[in-house]
Image: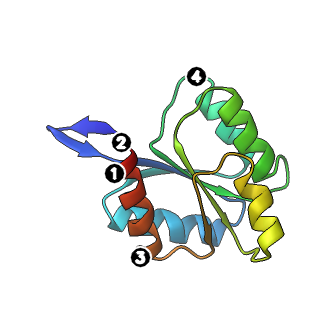
Amino acid sequence: MATSNGRTRTTALVVDDDRIIKTIHSKLLSKLGIENQVAANEKKVVDLHCPGKKFDLIMMDRDMPIMNGIEATRELRALGIRSIIVGVSTRSLEQEIQEFMDASLDDYQEKPLTSSKVISILHKINHNS
């Protein structure tokens, strides 16, 4: 977690191709005091991490046009990225959720995110750090 003025600040990356969902999730994180950045697709996430940018939390959409969330999560893990990666999707079939979890996700949440879902994720981050 990044520090500023002696305070620890959680950083997050919102990855979604839906402009409205990106905006909703980004504003929700900001309201909770989480510094965040958005990316339009998973390929941009991998590119962002190549120069060494680090995030505490990555909110990864499953269904994207260039590289899906499953592939992107696997690639990030192969690059040694240890950020908490939360899969975010509208899919609710157990098999589809499990397939996403098997890509080395730390958690899965159905869209749209809510304050209570994000707070639950933050508790997991704080207990794992």
Task: Report how far apart the C-alphas of labels 3 and 2 lie in the structure.
Answer: 20 Å
Q: In which quarter of the image is residue 74?
A: top right
Marks 1 and 4 close (CB-CB < 8 Å): no
Q: In which quarter of the image is the N terminus?
A: top left
Task: Report how far apart the C-alphas of labels 1 and 4 lie in the structure.
Answer: 26 Å
The residue under label 1 is 126
Marks 3 and 2 close (CB-CB < 8 Å): no
Q: Residue at x 61, y 33 (%)?
A: 48
Q: Which of marks 2 and 4 is nearer the N terminus?
A: 4
Mark in the foreground, 1 or 3: 1
Q: Which of marks 4 and 3 is nearer the N terminus?
A: 4
Mark in the foreground, 1 or 4: 1
The residue under label 4 is 51
Three-letter amino acid code at the position of disc 3: Ser
Task: Report how far apart the C-alphas of labels 1 and 3 lie in the structure.
Answer: 15 Å
Task: Report how far apart the C-alphas of labels 4 and 3 lie in the structure.
Answer: 33 Å
> What label does residue 129 carry, if any?
2
- Pick whichever, 5 or 85, lies toward us: 85
